[in-house]
Image (tube, grey):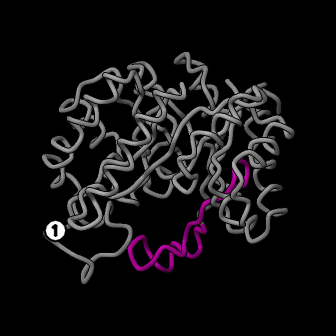
Amino acid sequence: MHVGMLTNSLFGVGETDIVKVADWAASQGFEEIELGASVPLDKRAIDAVMGKGDIKVGAFLYCRNFLLPDDGPAFLEELMKRIDLAAELGIEKVLTSTGIDRGWDWDEKFDFYDGIRKRPIRSLEKVVELFKPILELAEKKNIKIGWETCPVMGNIAISPYLIDILFERLQSDKLGLAYDPSHLVWEMMDPYEPILKYGRQGKIFHVHGKDTEIDRTRLAYTGILSDYSWWRYRVPGLGEINWNKIVSNLYEVGYDGVVSIEHEDPVWEGTKEKVERGLLIGKRTIEKAIHMES
């Protein structure tokens, strides 16, 4: 097992040269980078990173709502481009969302967190039909598709209940999870047991290193639905998650891949220097867990 990082946080503070991002990551001991949606599909630049051999390019991440009536087809085209390019470059994974059907209840009633408000199971049939050609291409190109477990960006793979139904309907050895325990924390689910369940099925393709902090005084005041001020994402080590237990469970199921730091911590954002420091805090936490240090 090793530590990687998602490019989004550095791109968000203006560092948009993927070669420079990769060079910094390699210099700090990250072993793998994950290319977020804002990274241009520039084969030459990605080739330049891979050609140096200093750091592995392990995945493309592209989460969008592919079932939107207007933008959905263009999002789907971009996803397919990433599958094709991943195969061409030798990148083994494309991480994504399922899409969610919002046509029957639109924004007047529900907000960005549609996955927890709108009975996402209602989108099942459309997701199944959407993913049949995606998986056909992935199987043809020998690319693993990992669903993020995040209830935003248009996604219904947000709980073991829904994931089980999806895996039953879409059976492919190229379909698995980009497992992110941070979401399960604020959704009031166990972030540890699903690792054992899906790891034993060979369905954990990728792991995101992101934490969640819960303000229990605020939660007692607002409840879970008034707003979302009672929780926030943190870098690993600064939230609720026991990373020793996460890593131990990953070891137990034979996972030997990346834990990719996904930095969305508001305390460590705003400048390049703060983002880099946040990434390194997360990296140290995961490394200690990997080496079973106290």
Identity of the residue drawn at 29% across and 64% down:
71
| Image quadrant assignment for residue 100 | bottom left
Query: What is the quadrant of the C terminus in the image?
Result: top right
Nearer to me, 16 or 269:
16
- Residue 81 lies, in percent from the top left, at 40, 42
Classify mark 1: residues with Cα within 10 Å, few (<14), some (14-19) or many (20+): few
Residue at the (29%, 53%) spot, across then down = 99
Question: Residue 148, how many percent across, how many down?
Answer: 43, 45
Out of 182 and 32, give the one closest to the viewer.
32
Relative vertical location of residue 294 with respect to residue 69 in this rendering, above or below: above
Picture quarter containing residue 96? top left
Q: Quadrant of residue 243?
A: top right
Would residue 254 be found to the left or right of residue 154 on screen? right
Give x and y (percent) for residue 191. Answer: 50, 42
- Determine whether, in the image, residue 2 is placed left or right of residue 182: right
Magenta residues span 215-238
Residue beneath disc 1: 103
Residue 66 in percent (x, y) is at: 29, 55
